[in-house]
Amino acid sequence: MTTSDLVRRGERSAALREQALRRTPGGVHSNVRLNGPQVFIERAKGAWLYDVDGRDYVDHLLGQGPNFLGHAPGDILAAVERACRDGMIYGGQHPLEVAAADAVCDALGWAERIRFGVTGTEQVQAAMRLARAATGRPKIIRFEGHYHGWLDNILIAPGERGWGPATAGQTPAHLADVIVLPWNDADAVRRTMAERGSEIAGIITEAMMINTGSILPRPGFLETLRELCTAHGAVLIFDEVISGFRIALGGAAERFGVTPDLATYGKAMAGGWPVAALAGRADLMDRFGTGEVNHSGTFNSSTMAMAATLATVTRLRERPPYEQISGYGDALREHLVALAAKHGVPLRVQGLPMAFHVSFGTDDAPGGDVADHRGLSRLDLARYERFAAHLVDHGVWVAGRGIWYVSAAHGDAELAATVERLDRAFATWVA
Ligand code: PLP
């Protein structure tokens, strides 16, 4: 059999998958990847992924968001390599973490203090713990369809009797202190705060619902959350693990003009390296500093994490890619809509150009108002998921749940390649 036969059949990926399944449950190390393409990647550079069978893909998933500057960005890589040569984890403090803390707080504008960690999941936990400690209250309001990490006290899924545990091994008791409300519904939050305000430690929200549907906050919604938290002495937490540094250098506070008390960051903040952060008001965050509230982590503020963060935030500040990324995203969306129309496919696109959502509209809601999780469930998401797999087969790497990310490494060549591949994918798509 020739090499090109192997490539065509994806045999190297298939062999690796078989081998992986012998040691690794489901063949993957994150359940998010269970339903993704079972293709093994050999390397990635800029906006491109290359698999072990010699195929290439224009990447619009970006590792679920972190590769905002493209894969293996040279300047960030050089900064990390320099830092690593002098050691990685000291179990003590070092100058780079001081510079990174200043850089992130300065870029955000509103944040007075910061603690670094590794994952978004743990930053959410730290934020909720701080809110509970500061208020002496137990309950956290969270919203339908938002994702705040995979731990028991916050993960939810819709069920027959409303929102509840999302996985075997998680019990309703784990969620006893969580109140789930529809998003973008100011009246629902107003009512709950009026009835139960004295129990509410905080409200956690994705400032923009990027993960599921790329849905913008309705005008006035974030402002209402701000007013209610202030009025009731609760803590407003923006989960900006996806939106931070992506929708603007200063995140949601810059983009939407509403300032939280605490906010979580990760993904786009560190050029692809595993770094996350909790930032916020001094009077809240300083509870970590006095030791009143615990926040720990062996790998927090490693030299490589801090070098990556400092280099990324400095670059975002000195050479902002936002205009270029928006221009690319707008052009790509126009091509998507035009190609879908050419091939008679009822495609629906919404959100911001740097992180937009693509789906097929159902007959009764072809372009209806999708302003929350309930609106999304009217769309034909399953059909789009099948189309996304077909698109991956044609060399465009996208998520089945519809989100398309754009990076600073996407340019003319990537647009031309994506359009050509999309055209072929639509032409061969049998719904
Ligand atoms: N919060 C939001 C809004 C996210 O999108 C994610 C992950 O996608 C998380 C928290 C969890 O972050 P991590 O996967 O780094 O634990």
Image (tube, helix red, strand yellow):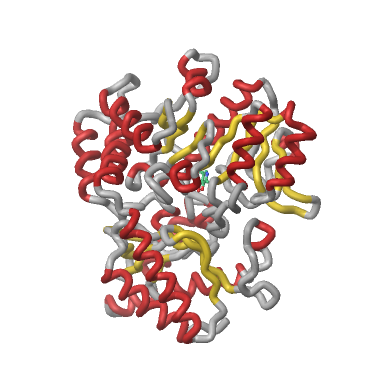
Judged left or right of residue 259, residue 46 is left
User: Taking the image as drawn, is residue 15 in sight?
Assistant: no
User: Quadrant of residue 180 in the image?
Assistant: top right
Judged left or right of residue 411, residue 179 is right
User: Taking the image as drawn, is residue 300 in sight?
Assistant: yes
Residue 237 drawn at (x, y percent): 56, 36
| Residue sitting nearer the eye, 387 or 9 | 387
Image point (53%, 55%), residue name = 26
On-image quarter of the N terminus: bottom left
Residue 250 drawn at (x, y percent): 40, 42
Judged left or right of residue 83, residue 386 is right
| Residue sitting nearer the eye, 4 or 226 | 226
Image point (48%, 62%), residue name = 356
Residue 406 drawn at (x, y percent): 38, 60
Q: Is residue 103 above or below residue 39?
A: above
On-image quarter of the C terminus: bottom right
Judged left or right of residue 239, residue 115 is left
Image point (53%, 29%), residue name = 126
Residue 32 drawn at (x, y percent): 53, 54
| Residue sitting nearer the eye, 362 or 350 | 350
Image point (75%, 38%), residue name = 192
| Residue sitting nearer the eye, 397 or 87 | 397
User: Quadrant of residue 17 in the image?
Assistant: bottom left
Q: Is residue 247 above or below residue 1?
A: above
Tag count: 0
